[in-house]
Amino acid sequence: MVPMRWFRVFGIVCLGAAPVALAEPAAAREAGLRVIQSARQVHDLTPAEALGSYPVHLRAVVTYYDPYIDGRHAALFIHDQSGAVFVALPVRPILPIKAGDLVDVQGVSGMGDYAPIVIKAQVGYVGPSHVPERPIRATLAQLLTPILDGQWVQVEGVVRAVRSSRTNVILDLATPGGSLAATTIREANVNYDALIDARVRVSANAAPVFNKKRQMVGVHLFFPGMKQLTVLQAAAADPFARPAIPLPAVLQFTPGVDVAHRVHVQGRVTLRWPGRTLCIQQGNDGLCMETSQATPVKSGDLIDAVGFPAISNYRATLEYAAYRVTAGGAASPIAPRVISASDAFRPEHDSELVQLEGEVVGQEHAGGDQTILVRAGPYLIPGIMPGSSFDAAHLAIKDQSVVRLTGICRSQINSEDTNFSEGEIRAGAVQLLLDSASGVQVVKVASWWTRRNTLGVLALVALVSLVTLVWVVVLRRQVNRQTHALRRSEERLRHLSEHDALTGLPNRNLLNDRMGMALQRARRFHQRIALLMVDLDRFKEVNDAQGHRAGDQVLCEIAHRLRSSVRMTDTVARIGGDEFIVLLPDLNQPEEAELVAGKVLAAVAAPIPAGQQPVALTVSVGVCRYPEGGETIEELMENVDTAMYAAKAQGRNGFEVYRPVLR
């Protein structure tokens, strides 16, 4: 018989060579209480029964033990022939057990954060064993149901990214049903980065993401170590060794090509925003990619880049991109294509290095980036550069100066026209991404007769005396010309001032327009729409702790995750500092809005890279549906705000649905 060692985890650690008789089960039997002896019986208790502190005595195999993952308690999943259950243990002492150990657990039933668990446990080591050999094969859709809560499951996917802390490693897995995170305990001498782009099979315990009402809103996997991860298709030892494909071939229809894996492209650098965006060009074709890499490169450097093909704002891009300067490729800057403002709206120029002239009508510094707004013909085009490259002396440009902008042409897609068309995108606006302040060249300095100077002269003339009639006529003509020009500029500026400068999301003005159109369609076709108000919990603490730059990075990442959580026909808007609105038109069932709210909570749950260390944030989400939540834009906005504050009042990190009070 294998000697059993007992660990009394709520008191002094006791080690022995023989089993120790424990009082709780014996006393329970004498009192006539049933002793639960299977994991499934514990998990299937009702909440009321779980709170009854039924005695529990299980002999099961450890599938996951982690004293680091949660500051409240250590995480222990155990599995017997009936299934798996969670055991809450104190963080200290750390027990000498691991996945595959056979243990004897005695405790009582309790209600966990989501489902019944075992609490007040005593854990005894019985001997070596192994984790279950036949995990449940599960899809993401199946995992997003309470049936598989806590169970030992198996999932396949492609590793897109690896994030690490001192004690844990998180893999971002892309599965056929969507993305999810898998957490494990960090092991020494393991090159986790080698898993990026590998197709893997992971055996793990499924853990729910839940709100304060114990409603499941997402799922997370916990696997004990690399022994439970099988590499089905290894990542290329050198992803750069794959043949480079032409830039237009990214996400083009190619029979038999698996777009779940990284692709290799090559081109010359046309724009680099360190740690954010890198654009390259090959001939007349351009591509911009998302990358956290900040390796210095120069404009014109020939580089190789690898990344995962993705769709962002109606354009092909690469996510999680990595790059390196091509050996033997001397820098040769790309000559920008000189275009007119109307040419910029042509789709073939999107992501291409272009150059156009215009008259400066305004400048602003918001969200860490600098924007210079120019008028070119009948269009207003903003030029945007990162704040890190902002040169105040270089950009001391007067309004009405003529400048030449050199940057990456980025079309802002008109989603309404595009969705009603045959499938080809329609540009609704254009902006230029500038590499640095050197992308702004002054062609003609503004006349001294700016609006301010003219008004100053008029004030001086009014105070001193009337000048000659000729001067009065000249000045009035100048004032009228300036006034008409400014009015035209304001009208065109209003057309392009519908997007948030930091995140690129629609602002309140554009949101109201789309809500109005959605309400008209909903009334005409008797459809449902819904609004979600997403508010970051304790976002001020991020700004206070790491600075506003880190806060801006968090907002941009939240915006990206929100866009990734909804359909292309939905609208994600930023209406305040840390407040976002999600407009969900054309709903078939009212419950779809709650599913989207759950996806939003799950998407935000993963730590966000920002500043010096990842930031863990939660959100409070209000849900309001038409028509029961209101008939007008004002009513819907007011009621979704009420629902969001109700979610905060419930403890944050959850969502609340607005339900009208029946009178």
Image (cartoon, grey):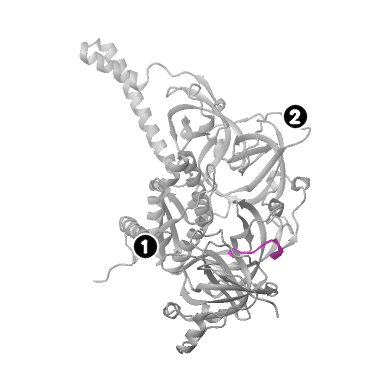
Disc number placed over residue 330 in the picture, else none: 2
- In the image: residue 145, left or right of residue 49: right
Q: State the residue position of label 1.
A: 650
Q: Residues within 10 Å of mark 2 (few under 14, many from 20)?
A: few
The residue nearer to you, when weighing 260 against 496, is 260
Q: How many marks?
A: 2
498 versus 445 height, above or below? below
Image x and y of residue 647, in percent: 37, 61
Which residue does the image show at 65% across and 51% down from the upper left? Answer: 309
507 versus 451 height, above or below? below
Give the mark toward the camera: 2 or 1. Answer: 1
Please name the amino acid that badge 2 sits on.
Ala
Would you identify the image quadrant in which residue 590 lies?
A: bottom left
Image x and y of residue 419, in percent: 52, 55
| Magenta span | 221-229
- In the image: residue 636, left or right of residue 136: left
Please name the amino acid that badge 1 sits on.
Gln
Image x and y of residue 528, in percent: 41, 65
